[in-house]
Image (spheres, helix red, strand yellow):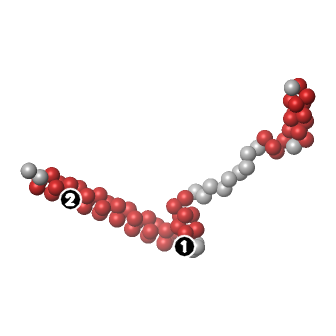
Amino acid sequence: MSSEFEMKSLKLLADPNKLRGKKVNIPSDRLKHEIEVKFNYKLNNIIYQHILETIRTELVMDALLNDIINQVTLNHNP
């Protein structure tokens, strides 16, 4: 067992970079990156901000419509 430990130690001494993990390049904004990859198009900040505002507006409208539908459903149930 000690010889196995010795061999691993020698390998690490020979190449200390083995202790370091691979660096993964994580984009700062994953949504922007996913859109760029999906549509094979490089977004500029103006277009991306417009897309974010559109999504935000759609989500707010969806939440409001769901609330209204739920209120109507509750009021019409006997």
Task: Tell me which corner region of the image, top left, top right, bottom left or bottom right, holds residue 68.
Answer: bottom left
Q: What is the number of the mark on residue 69?
A: 2
Residue 10 lies left or right of residue 23; in this view the side is right
Image marks 1 and 2: residues in contact by CB distance under 8 Å: no
Q: Measuring 57% from the left and 74% from the top, which residue is drawn there? A: 41
Neighbour tally class for label 2: few under 14, some 14-19, many 20 plus, Cα within 10 Å: few
What number of labels is visible?
2
Q: Measuring 73% from the left and 49% from the top, which residue is drawn there? A: 22
Q: Measuring 39% from the left and 68% from the top, which residue is drawn there? A: 54
Task: Tell me which corner region of the image, top left, top right, bottom left or bottom right, holds residue 4.
Answer: top right
Outermost residue toward the left?
A: 78
Residue 73 lies left or right of residue 44; in this view the side is left
Q: Which of marks 1 and 2 is nearer the N terminus?
A: 1
Task: Tell me which corner region of the image, top left, top right, bottom left or bottom right, holds residue 18.
Answer: top right
SS category of the residue bearing label 1: helix
Q: What is the number of the mark on residue 17?
A: none
Residue 5 lies left or right of residue 56; in this view the side is right
41 w.r.t. 1: above or below: below
Q: Measured from the top left, where is residue 63 in percent x and y?
A: 29, 58
Q: Measuring 34% from the left and 65% from the top, which residue is drawn there? A: 58
20 w.r.t. 65: above or below: above
Q: What is the number of the mark on residue 39?
A: 1
SS category of the residue bearing label 2: helix
Measure the alpha-carbon separation of dots 1 and 2.
34 Å
Q: Measured from the top left, where is residue 28 in percent x and y?
A: 58, 57
Neighbour tally class for label 1: few under 14, some 14-19, many 20 plus, Cα within 10 Å: few
Q: Measured from the top left, where is residue 16 in percent x and y?
A: 84, 41
- Three-letter code, disc 1: Phe
- Three-letter code, disc 2: Ile
Which quadrant of the figure contains the N terminus?
A: top right
Q: Measured from the top left, where is residue 53 in percent x and y?
A: 40, 65
